[in-house]
Image (cartoon, coloured by chain):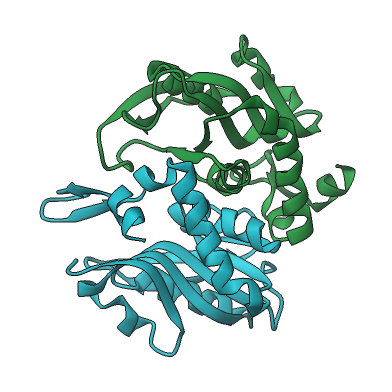
Chain colours: A green, B cyan
Protein backbone atom coordinates (compact mmCIF):
# COMPACT_ATOMS: atom_id res chain seq x y z
CA UNK A 1 0.00 0.00 0.00
CA UNK A 2 2.97 2.29 0.50
CA UNK A 3 3.58 1.76 -3.19
CA UNK A 4 0.09 3.04 -3.93
CA UNK A 5 0.67 6.06 -1.74
CA UNK A 6 3.77 6.82 -3.77
CA UNK A 7 1.56 6.93 -6.86
CA UNK A 8 -0.74 9.60 -5.42
CA UNK A 9 0.34 13.05 -6.47
CA UNK A 10 0.18 15.93 -4.04
CA UNK A 11 -0.74 19.24 -5.68
CA UNK A 12 -0.22 22.31 -3.48
CA UNK A 13 -2.74 25.17 -3.45
CA UNK A 14 -5.57 23.33 -5.21
CA UNK A 15 -8.44 24.08 -5.36
CA UNK A 16 -7.30 27.08 -3.34
CA UNK A 17 -4.28 28.48 -1.52
CA UNK A 18 -3.04 26.42 1.40
CA UNK A 19 -4.72 23.15 0.45
CA UNK A 20 -2.64 20.08 -0.36
CA UNK A 21 -4.74 18.23 -2.92
CA UNK A 22 -4.25 14.47 -3.06
CA UNK A 23 -4.53 13.62 -6.74
CA UNK A 24 -5.50 9.98 -7.35
CA UNK A 25 -5.42 10.25 -11.14
CA UNK A 26 -1.74 9.33 -11.10
CA UNK A 27 -2.66 6.07 -9.36
CA UNK A 28 -5.72 5.35 -11.51
CA UNK A 29 -3.73 5.61 -14.74
CA UNK A 30 -1.40 2.85 -13.50
CA UNK A 31 -3.23 -0.33 -14.50
CA UNK A 32 -1.49 -2.55 -12.00
CA UNK A 33 -2.10 -0.21 -9.06
CA UNK A 34 -5.71 0.45 -10.05
CA UNK A 35 -6.30 -3.29 -10.26
CA UNK A 36 -4.59 -3.82 -6.91
CA UNK A 37 -6.78 -1.23 -5.20
CA UNK A 38 -9.98 -2.75 -6.56
CA UNK A 39 -8.85 -6.30 -5.67
CA UNK A 40 -8.10 -5.15 -2.16
CA UNK A 41 -11.57 -3.62 -1.75
CA UNK A 42 -13.06 -6.75 -3.31
CA UNK A 43 -11.40 -9.04 -0.79
CA UNK A 44 -12.71 -6.90 2.03
CA UNK A 45 -16.32 -6.99 0.82
CA UNK A 46 -16.76 -10.23 -1.10
CA UNK A 47 -18.12 -12.09 1.91
CA UNK A 48 -20.37 -9.23 3.07
CA UNK A 49 -23.18 -10.01 0.65
CA UNK A 50 -23.27 -6.42 -0.52
CA UNK A 51 -26.25 -5.81 -2.83
CA UNK A 52 -25.19 -2.44 -4.25
CA UNK A 53 -22.25 -0.08 -4.41
CA UNK A 54 -23.20 3.58 -4.06
CA UNK A 55 -20.61 6.02 -5.43
CA UNK A 56 -20.43 9.76 -5.02
CA UNK A 57 -20.00 12.14 -7.96
CA UNK A 58 -17.52 12.30 -9.64
CA UNK A 59 -14.34 10.46 -8.65
CA UNK A 60 -16.36 7.99 -6.59
CA UNK A 61 -17.83 6.80 -9.88
CA UNK A 62 -14.46 5.49 -11.09
CA UNK A 63 -13.69 3.28 -8.11
CA UNK A 64 -17.36 2.54 -7.49
CA UNK A 65 -18.03 1.36 -11.03
CA UNK A 66 -14.99 -0.90 -10.97
CA UNK A 67 -15.78 -2.37 -7.57
CA UNK A 68 -19.46 -2.96 -8.35
CA UNK A 69 -18.38 -4.79 -11.48
CA UNK A 70 -15.86 -6.85 -9.50
CA UNK A 71 -18.42 -7.76 -6.85
CA UNK A 72 -21.00 -8.55 -9.52
CA UNK A 73 -23.50 -6.10 -8.06
CA UNK A 74 -25.22 -2.97 -9.28
CA UNK A 75 -23.88 0.57 -9.08
CA UNK A 76 -25.93 3.55 -7.90
CA UNK A 77 -24.76 7.15 -8.38
CA UNK A 78 -25.27 9.91 -5.83
CA UNK A 79 -25.11 13.26 -7.59
CA UNK A 80 -25.29 16.99 -7.19
CA UNK A 81 -28.81 18.48 -7.48
CA UNK A 82 -30.42 18.50 -10.90
CA UNK A 83 -28.22 15.87 -12.49
CA UNK A 84 -30.38 12.76 -11.97
CA UNK A 85 -33.30 12.70 -14.40
CA UNK A 86 -36.03 10.78 -12.57
CA UNK A 87 -37.65 11.21 -9.14
CA UNK A 88 -35.05 11.89 -6.49
CA UNK A 89 -34.71 12.50 -2.79
CA UNK A 90 -32.27 15.07 -1.44
CA UNK A 91 -30.13 15.65 1.63
CA UNK A 92 -28.49 18.98 2.39
CA UNK A 93 -25.22 19.24 4.25
CA UNK A 94 -22.94 21.93 5.63
CA UNK A 95 -19.85 23.14 3.83
CA UNK A 96 -17.09 25.26 5.26
CA UNK A 97 -18.88 28.20 3.65
CA UNK A 98 -22.57 27.64 3.02
CA UNK A 99 -24.53 24.51 2.17
CA UNK A 100 -24.66 21.92 -0.56
CA UNK A 101 -26.91 19.00 -1.38
CA UNK A 102 -26.81 15.51 -2.86
CA UNK A 103 -29.51 13.47 -4.56
CA UNK A 104 -30.28 9.84 -5.27
CA UNK A 105 -33.01 8.31 -7.40
CA UNK A 106 -35.98 7.38 -5.27
CA UNK A 107 -36.11 3.89 -6.80
CA UNK A 108 -32.34 3.26 -6.68
CA UNK A 109 -32.38 1.18 -3.51
CA UNK A 110 -34.91 -1.34 -2.23
CA UNK A 111 -35.71 -1.54 1.49
CA UNK A 112 -33.23 -3.89 3.14
CA UNK A 113 -30.59 -3.65 0.40
CA UNK A 114 -27.09 -3.95 1.85
CA UNK A 115 -25.15 -0.99 0.51
CA UNK A 116 -21.45 -0.22 0.39
CA UNK A 117 -20.83 3.54 0.16
CA UNK A 118 -17.60 4.29 -1.68
CA UNK A 119 -15.77 7.51 -2.39
CA UNK A 120 -12.20 8.37 -3.21
CA UNK A 121 -11.57 10.74 -0.30
CA UNK A 122 -12.66 11.12 3.32
CA UNK A 123 -12.06 14.76 4.26
CA UNK A 124 -14.61 16.41 6.58
CA UNK A 125 -17.10 13.62 5.98
CA UNK A 126 -19.91 15.90 4.82
CA UNK A 127 -20.63 14.22 1.51
CA UNK A 128 -20.22 10.72 2.92
CA UNK A 129 -22.56 11.45 5.80
CA UNK A 130 -25.16 12.91 3.43
CA UNK A 131 -24.81 9.84 1.21
CA UNK A 132 -25.44 7.50 4.13
CA UNK A 133 -28.54 9.50 5.01
CA UNK A 134 -29.81 9.15 1.44
CA UNK A 135 -29.31 5.38 1.57
CA UNK A 136 -31.14 5.13 4.87
CA UNK A 137 -34.02 7.33 3.74
CA UNK A 138 -34.61 4.65 1.12
CA UNK A 139 -34.36 2.03 3.88
CA UNK A 140 -31.08 0.64 2.64
CA UNK A 141 -28.54 -0.69 5.15
CA UNK A 142 -25.08 0.90 5.05
CA UNK A 143 -22.65 -2.02 5.41
CA UNK A 144 -19.59 0.21 5.47
CA UNK A 145 -18.33 3.55 4.19
CA UNK A 146 -15.09 3.02 2.28
CA UNK A 147 -12.50 5.42 0.93
CA UNK A 148 -9.29 5.18 -0.98
CA UNK A 149 -7.81 8.08 1.00
CA UNK A 150 -8.47 9.49 4.46
CA UNK A 151 -7.19 12.88 5.65
CA UNK A 152 -6.90 12.15 9.36
CA UNK A 153 -6.58 15.76 10.48
CA UNK A 154 -10.06 16.64 9.23
CA UNK A 155 -11.68 14.06 11.52
CA UNK A 156 -14.28 12.95 9.01
CA UNK A 157 -14.84 9.77 11.02
CA UNK A 158 -16.48 11.82 13.74
CA UNK A 159 -19.18 12.86 11.30
CA UNK A 160 -19.65 9.19 10.38
CA UNK A 161 -20.12 7.97 13.94
CA UNK A 162 -22.30 4.90 14.05
CA UNK A 163 -21.05 3.63 10.70
CA UNK A 164 -18.22 1.27 9.94
CA UNK A 165 -15.55 3.29 8.14
CA UNK A 166 -12.60 1.96 6.16
CA UNK A 167 -9.85 3.76 4.29
CA UNK A 168 -7.01 2.21 2.38
CA UNK A 169 -4.48 5.03 2.55
CA UNK A 170 -4.28 7.78 5.15
CA UNK A 171 -2.48 11.08 5.51
CA UNK A 172 -1.77 12.96 8.71
CA UNK A 173 -3.08 16.51 8.66
CA UNK A 174 -5.56 17.90 6.15
CA UNK B 1 -28.91 -6.61 -25.74
CA UNK B 2 -32.63 -5.99 -26.18
CA UNK B 3 -32.85 -6.94 -22.50
CA UNK B 4 -30.37 -4.21 -21.66
CA UNK B 5 -32.37 -1.72 -23.69
CA UNK B 6 -35.43 -2.64 -21.66
CA UNK B 7 -33.48 -1.67 -18.53
CA UNK B 8 -32.78 1.86 -19.78
CA UNK B 9 -35.40 4.29 -18.55
CA UNK B 10 -36.66 7.05 -20.83
CA UNK B 11 -37.41 10.27 -18.98
CA UNK B 12 -39.38 12.84 -21.02
CA UNK B 13 -38.53 16.55 -20.85
CA UNK B 14 -35.14 16.21 -19.13
CA UNK B 15 -32.98 18.22 -18.89
CA UNK B 16 -35.46 20.42 -20.76
CA UNK B 17 -38.79 20.30 -22.54
CA UNK B 18 -38.93 18.07 -25.60
CA UNK B 19 -35.88 15.95 -24.80
CA UNK B 20 -36.24 12.22 -24.21
CA UNK B 21 -33.46 11.47 -21.74
CA UNK B 22 -32.08 7.93 -21.81
CA UNK B 23 -31.35 7.12 -18.19
CA UNK B 24 -28.77 4.36 -17.77
CA UNK B 25 -28.92 4.34 -13.97
CA UNK B 26 -31.69 1.75 -14.10
CA UNK B 27 -29.35 -0.54 -16.03
CA UNK B 28 -26.29 0.17 -13.86
CA UNK B 29 -28.09 -0.74 -10.66
CA UNK B 30 -28.83 -4.20 -12.10
CA UNK B 31 -25.69 -6.16 -11.24
CA UNK B 32 -26.19 -8.80 -13.90
CA UNK B 33 -26.82 -6.29 -16.68
CA UNK B 34 -23.94 -4.05 -15.62
CA UNK B 35 -21.64 -7.04 -15.60
CA UNK B 36 -22.93 -8.14 -18.99
CA UNK B 37 -22.28 -4.74 -20.53
CA UNK B 38 -18.72 -4.61 -19.21
CA UNK B 39 -18.03 -8.19 -20.31
CA UNK B 40 -19.29 -7.34 -23.76
CA UNK B 41 -16.98 -4.31 -24.04
CA UNK B 42 -14.16 -6.43 -22.64
CA UNK B 43 -14.57 -9.09 -25.33
CA UNK B 44 -14.46 -6.42 -27.98
CA UNK B 45 -11.23 -4.84 -26.73
CA UNK B 46 -9.28 -7.59 -24.99
CA UNK B 47 -7.22 -8.38 -28.08
CA UNK B 48 -6.64 -4.73 -29.04
CA UNK B 49 -3.76 -4.20 -26.61
CA UNK B 50 -5.41 -1.09 -25.25
CA UNK B 51 -3.05 0.75 -22.86
CA UNK B 52 -5.57 3.10 -21.28
CA UNK B 53 -9.28 3.75 -21.04
CA UNK B 54 -10.22 7.43 -21.16
CA UNK B 55 -13.63 8.23 -19.69
CA UNK B 56 -15.60 11.46 -19.88
CA UNK B 57 -17.07 13.15 -16.79
CA UNK B 58 -19.29 12.02 -15.17
CA UNK B 59 -21.20 8.95 -16.32
CA UNK B 60 -18.29 7.86 -18.48
CA UNK B 61 -16.37 7.33 -15.25
CA UNK B 62 -18.68 4.51 -14.15
CA UNK B 63 -18.34 2.39 -17.27
CA UNK B 64 -14.77 3.52 -17.87
CA UNK B 65 -13.57 2.61 -14.40
CA UNK B 66 -15.14 -0.82 -14.64
CA UNK B 67 -13.81 -1.52 -18.12
CA UNK B 68 -10.29 -0.33 -17.31
CA UNK B 69 -10.30 -2.63 -14.29
CA UNK B 70 -11.56 -5.53 -16.43
CA UNK B 71 -8.92 -4.94 -19.09
CA UNK B 72 -6.23 -4.55 -16.42
CA UNK B 73 -5.24 -1.12 -17.71
CA UNK B 74 -5.21 2.37 -16.28
CA UNK B 75 -8.09 4.83 -16.33
CA UNK B 76 -7.75 8.49 -17.30
CA UNK B 77 -10.49 11.05 -16.63
CA UNK B 78 -11.40 13.86 -19.00
CA UNK B 79 -13.12 16.61 -17.06
CA UNK B 80 -14.77 20.01 -17.22
CA UNK B 81 -12.39 22.97 -16.80
CA UNK B 82 -10.94 23.57 -13.37
CA UNK B 83 -11.57 20.09 -11.97
CA UNK B 84 -8.20 18.46 -12.62
CA UNK B 85 -5.57 19.65 -10.15
CA UNK B 86 -2.29 19.39 -12.06
CA UNK B 87 -1.12 20.74 -15.42
CA UNK B 88 -3.77 20.26 -18.08
CA UNK B 89 -4.42 20.83 -21.73
CA UNK B 90 -7.81 22.00 -22.97
CA UNK B 91 -10.01 21.65 -26.03
CA UNK B 92 -13.07 23.82 -26.63
CA UNK B 93 -16.09 22.59 -28.52
CA UNK B 94 -19.40 23.92 -29.77
CA UNK B 95 -22.65 23.38 -27.95
CA UNK B 96 -26.13 23.99 -29.31
CA UNK B 97 -25.94 27.33 -27.50
CA UNK B 98 -22.43 28.58 -26.81
CA UNK B 99 -19.20 26.73 -26.15
CA UNK B 100 -17.80 24.39 -23.56
CA UNK B 101 -14.39 22.87 -22.88
CA UNK B 102 -12.78 19.69 -21.61
CA UNK B 103 -9.41 19.09 -20.00
CA UNK B 104 -6.99 16.24 -19.49
CA UNK B 105 -3.82 16.08 -17.41
CA UNK B 106 -0.79 16.81 -19.54
CA UNK B 107 1.00 13.72 -18.21
CA UNK B 108 -1.99 11.39 -18.42
CA UNK B 109 -0.99 9.78 -21.71
CA UNK B 110 2.40 8.84 -23.10
CA UNK B 111 3.15 9.27 -26.80
CA UNK B 112 2.08 6.11 -28.60
CA UNK B 113 -0.33 4.89 -25.90
CA UNK B 114 -3.28 3.05 -27.41
CA UNK B 115 -6.37 4.63 -25.96
CA UNK B 116 -9.97 3.52 -25.84
CA UNK B 117 -12.32 6.49 -25.41
CA UNK B 118 -15.49 5.49 -23.58
CA UNK B 119 -18.64 7.40 -22.71
CA UNK B 120 -22.17 6.40 -21.88
CA UNK B 121 -23.89 8.35 -24.66
CA UNK B 122 -23.19 9.41 -28.23
CA UNK B 123 -25.47 12.36 -28.97
CA UNK B 124 -24.07 15.17 -31.16
CA UNK B 125 -20.52 13.87 -30.68
CA UNK B 126 -19.13 17.16 -29.36
CA UNK B 127 -17.64 15.85 -26.14
CA UNK B 128 -16.35 12.66 -27.74
CA UNK B 129 -14.69 14.58 -30.55
CA UNK B 130 -13.07 16.97 -28.06
CA UNK B 131 -11.88 13.99 -26.02
CA UNK B 132 -10.25 12.41 -29.07
CA UNK B 133 -8.49 15.71 -29.79
CA UNK B 134 -7.16 15.80 -26.22
CA UNK B 135 -5.80 12.26 -26.58
CA UNK B 136 -4.14 13.11 -29.87
CA UNK B 137 -2.63 16.37 -28.57
CA UNK B 138 -0.79 14.13 -26.10
CA UNK B 139 0.20 11.87 -29.02
CA UNK B 140 -2.01 9.02 -27.90
CA UNK B 141 -3.63 6.78 -30.50
CA UNK B 142 -7.42 6.51 -30.39
CA UNK B 143 -8.15 2.82 -30.94
CA UNK B 144 -11.89 3.29 -30.92
CA UNK B 145 -14.58 5.53 -29.47
CA UNK B 146 -17.14 3.42 -27.65
CA UNK B 147 -20.55 4.20 -26.19
CA UNK B 148 -23.22 2.32 -24.35
CA UNK B 149 -25.94 4.29 -26.17
CA UNK B 150 -26.10 6.03 -29.53
CA UNK B 151 -28.85 8.46 -30.54
CA UNK B 152 -28.82 7.89 -34.28
CA UNK B 153 -30.85 10.98 -35.18
CA UNK B 154 -28.19 13.34 -33.86
CA UNK B 155 -25.57 11.98 -36.27
CA UNK B 156 -22.73 12.12 -33.79
CA UNK B 157 -20.75 9.72 -35.97
CA UNK B 158 -20.33 12.45 -38.55
CA UNK B 159 -18.41 14.50 -35.99
CA UNK B 160 -16.23 11.46 -35.29
CA UNK B 161 -15.29 10.84 -38.91
CA UNK B 162 -11.90 9.19 -39.17
CA UNK B 163 -12.34 7.30 -35.92
CA UNK B 164 -13.69 3.83 -35.36
CA UNK B 165 -16.96 4.20 -33.47
CA UNK B 166 -18.88 1.51 -31.62
CA UNK B 167 -22.12 1.66 -29.70
CA UNK B 168 -23.84 -1.16 -27.90
CA UNK B 169 -27.41 0.10 -27.95
CA UNK B 170 -28.95 2.56 -30.37
CA UNK B 171 -32.13 4.61 -30.58
CA UNK B 172 -33.70 6.10 -33.67
CA UNK B 173 -34.22 9.86 -33.37
CA UNK B 174 -32.70 12.09 -30.75
Asked whether residue A94 appears in the rendered view, the answer is no
How many marks are shown on the rendered structure? 0
Residue at 70% over, 68% down: B107
Of residues A22 and B41, the one drawn nearer to the viewer in this rendering: B41
- Picture quadrant of residue B170: bottom left
Q: In the rendered image of this protein, does residue A13 appear above or below residue B169?
A: above
Q: Position of residue B160 (x, y in %)?
A: 39, 82
Of residues B150 and B14, the one drawn nearer to the viewer in this rendering: B150
Q: In the rendered image of this protein, does residue B105 appear above or below residue A135?
A: below
Which quadrant holds the N terminus of chain B? bottom left
Asked whether residue A167 appears in the rendered view, the answer is yes
Q: Is residue B120 left or right of residue B65?
A: left
- Picture quadrant of residue B64: bottom right
Which quadrant holds the C terminus of chain B? bottom left
Q: In the rendered image of this protein, does residue A56 appear above or below residue A29?
A: above
Q: Is residue A162 left or right of residue A101?
A: right
Residue at 82% over, 45% down: A5
Residue at 36% over, 54% down: B4
Q: Position of residue B50 (x, y in %)?
A: 65, 74
Residue at 25% over, 78% down: B155
Q: Position of residue A154 (x, y in %)?
A: 69, 23
Of residues A43 and A29, the one drawn nearer to the viewer in this rendering: A43
- Picture quadrant of residue A162: top right
Q: In the rendered image of this protein, does residue B111 appear above or below residue B71?
A: below
In the image as oriented, which residue stretches furthest toward the right?
A: A2
In the image as oriented, which residue stretches furthest toward the left?
A: B18
Q: Position of residue B115 (x, y in %)?
A: 60, 75
Amino acid sequence: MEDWKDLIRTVPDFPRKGILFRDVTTLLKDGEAFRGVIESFYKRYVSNQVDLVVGVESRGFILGGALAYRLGVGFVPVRKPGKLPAQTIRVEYELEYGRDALEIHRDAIRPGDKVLVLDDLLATGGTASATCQLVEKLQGIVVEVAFLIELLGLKGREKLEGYKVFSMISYEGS
